[in-house]
């Protein structure tokens, strides 16, 4: 067993390779039934094989791949299936286009739909089997980490405990204490992992030093300084080491490219989602005869105020405040629209108008901006970039994510901005649909 433990990373890597090889073989062997050329030495085989491998690598890097022990099995399967399905579809359309010639099809037409569906089903089974096997193998060798939660109060500790509870195979809560506890150092020694949440920076430094000295795993939520350090460069002036961070905003060329991308993609999405928009509007109107759209003042770059468009999900003429669990203001239609984020689609109009971007900090209600800024002055930093339909806070956060965590998520995006990152986040937004129940958790859910 000791030998297996030493080589577990290599074994999991081998399982990952075999899994992808099985998915690859499924696609090419199934489609070779009617397209023999894709498994023979030919230009068609070289092009389709290269396309499949490149797209799969890129999408796996975007959605995550065989992250056994780090994510839930369900999330890993969803990521693998989404990467595999998109890779299959792109390669399938490429193969169809290549067959549009005088020797095969004189006009473009879709073929082998049944084979495509069969490939997707077989790959789904492959992914489920390998994820289950990999997960059992990993947790057979690795016991759950005994975690010590150190927080500033019970509310903060409860949020961390709830998050860890969703990963019960990986983490077990050994104890929960305040950072002023007299036995803090002794309890750290008894734990495998120390999780710091909302702990003052000066105290955190002492705890981290003690954890490092005693070889303990450390998790801590970042401050603004931590995010700036992460985006800094290591430099040496004479013989003095520094972390160098230079103040910067999105460049002129980047703004132009970002705006062009916003316009083109949002217009395409408006056309593609027009049936959903129409059906949603009809359902809202039929439900209670009220207005289809909901308009509200929101803040964007430099504090500029704009009117955001959303599908109305609440009853008309009710109190304007953030939603809570079992909120009786939400209509039956509204619950469905919220669950799958369909209520956000009209914001594509805001993007076309230039009020918002596809990717950017979450646009908060004016009341929330004022309250959060009083509570956390740094909250205004997120107004350095135009508000977005999607972003770190929208993908990884929830409706009830704390104001401080929203700020950190948005600053992570702002300080690490790139057009490539925007494209990755747009692809990752698709995963929000699969975790609809989690991402739409409202204030009051514990």
Image (spheres, helix red, strand yellow):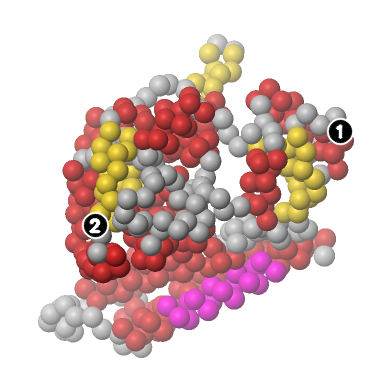
Q: Is residue 53 visible?
A: no
Who's the residue at 67% across and 31% down the image?
Answer: 199
Percent position (x, y) of residue 221? 61, 37
- Whether 343 is among the magenta residues is no
- The chief SS type of the magenta part is helix
Who's the residue at 53% across and 35% down the image?
Answer: 404
Instruction: Decide if residue 367 is on the left or right side of residue 211.
Output: left
Considering depth in this image, is 340 or 119 the residue closer to the camera? 340
Q: Where's the N terminus, which quadrant?
A: bottom right
Residues drawn in magenta = 120-136
Q: Is residue 138 visible?
A: yes
* Residue 197 placement: quadrant: top right
Cα separation, mark 2 vs mark 1, equals 59 Å
Residue beneath label 1, please? 183
* Residue 333 placement: quadrant: bottom left
Image label count: 2
Who's the residue at 31% across and 83% down the image?
Answer: 113
Percent position (x, y) of residue 190? 86, 43
Instruction: Decide if residue 363 is on the left or right side of residue 26.
Output: left
Considering depth in this image, is 46 or 224 the residue closer to the camera? 224
User: Residue extending furthest front?
Assistant: 317
User: What kind of element bears circle 1?
Assistant: loop
Nearest-to-viewer mark from 2 and 1 = 2
Instruction: Decide if residue 14 is on the left or right side of residue 341.
Output: right
Residue beneath label 2, please? 291
- Whether 127 is among the magenta residues is yes
User: What kind of element bears circle 2?
Assistant: loop
Who's the residue at 40% across and 58% down the image?
Answer: 330
Binning the other alpha carbons within 10 Å of mark 2 as few (below 14), some (14 to 19) or many (20 upward) gives few
């Amino acid at each position: 067993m000791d030998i297996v433990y030493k080589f577990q990373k290599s074994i999991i890597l081998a399982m990952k390779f075999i899994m992808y090889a099985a998915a690859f073989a499924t696609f090419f062997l199934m489609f070779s039934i009617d397209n023999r050329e894709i498994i023979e030495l030919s230009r068609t085989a070289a092009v389709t094989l290269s396309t499949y491998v490149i797209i799969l690598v890129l999408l796996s890097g975007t959605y995550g791949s065989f992250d056994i022990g780090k994510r839930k099995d369900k999330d890993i399967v969803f990521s693998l299936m989404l990467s595999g399905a998109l890779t299959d579809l792109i390669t399938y359309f490429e193969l169809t286009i290549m067959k549009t010639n005088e020797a095969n099809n004189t006009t473009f037409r879709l073929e082998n739909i049944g084979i495509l569906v069969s490939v997707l089903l077989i790959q789904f089974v492959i992914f489920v089997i390998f994820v289950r096997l990999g997960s059992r193998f990993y947790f057979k060798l690795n016991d759950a980490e005994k975690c010590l939660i150190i927080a500033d109060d019970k509310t903060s500790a409860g949020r961390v405990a709830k998050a860890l509870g969703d990963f019960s195979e990986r983490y077990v809560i050994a104890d929960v204490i305040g950072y002023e506890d007299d036995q803090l150092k002794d309890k750290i020694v008894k734990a495998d992992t120390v999780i710091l949440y909302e702990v003052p920076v000066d105290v955190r430094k002492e705890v981290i030093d003690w954890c490092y000295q005693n070889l303990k795993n450390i998790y801590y939520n970042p401050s603004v300084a931590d995010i700036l350090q992460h985006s800094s460069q290591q430099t040496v002036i004479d013989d003095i080491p520094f972390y160098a961070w230079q103040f910067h905003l999105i460049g002129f060329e980047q703004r132009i490219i970002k705006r062009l991308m916003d316009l083109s993609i949002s217009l395409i999405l408006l056309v593609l989602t027009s049936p959903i928009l129409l059906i949603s509007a009809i359902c809202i109107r039929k439900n209670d005869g009220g207005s289809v759209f909901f308009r509200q003042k929101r803040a964007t770059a430099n504090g500029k105020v704009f009117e955001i468009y959303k599908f109305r999900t609440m009853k008309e003429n009710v109190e304007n405040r953030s939603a809570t669990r079992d909120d009786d203001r939400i209509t039956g239609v509204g619950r469905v629209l919220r669950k799958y984020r369909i209520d956000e689609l009209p914001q594509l109009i805001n993007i076309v108008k230039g009020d918002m971007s596809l990717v950017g900090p979450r646009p908060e209600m004016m009341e929330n901006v004022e309250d959060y800024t009083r509570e956390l002055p740094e909250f205004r930093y997120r107004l350095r970039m135009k508000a977005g339909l999607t972003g770190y806070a929208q993908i990884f956060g929830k409706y009830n994510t704390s104001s401080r965590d929203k700020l950190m998520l948005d600053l992570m995006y702002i300080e690490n901005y790139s057009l490539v990152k925007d494209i990755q986040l747009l692809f990752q937004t698709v995963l929000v649909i699969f975790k609809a129940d989690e991402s739409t958790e409202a204030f009051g859910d514990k």
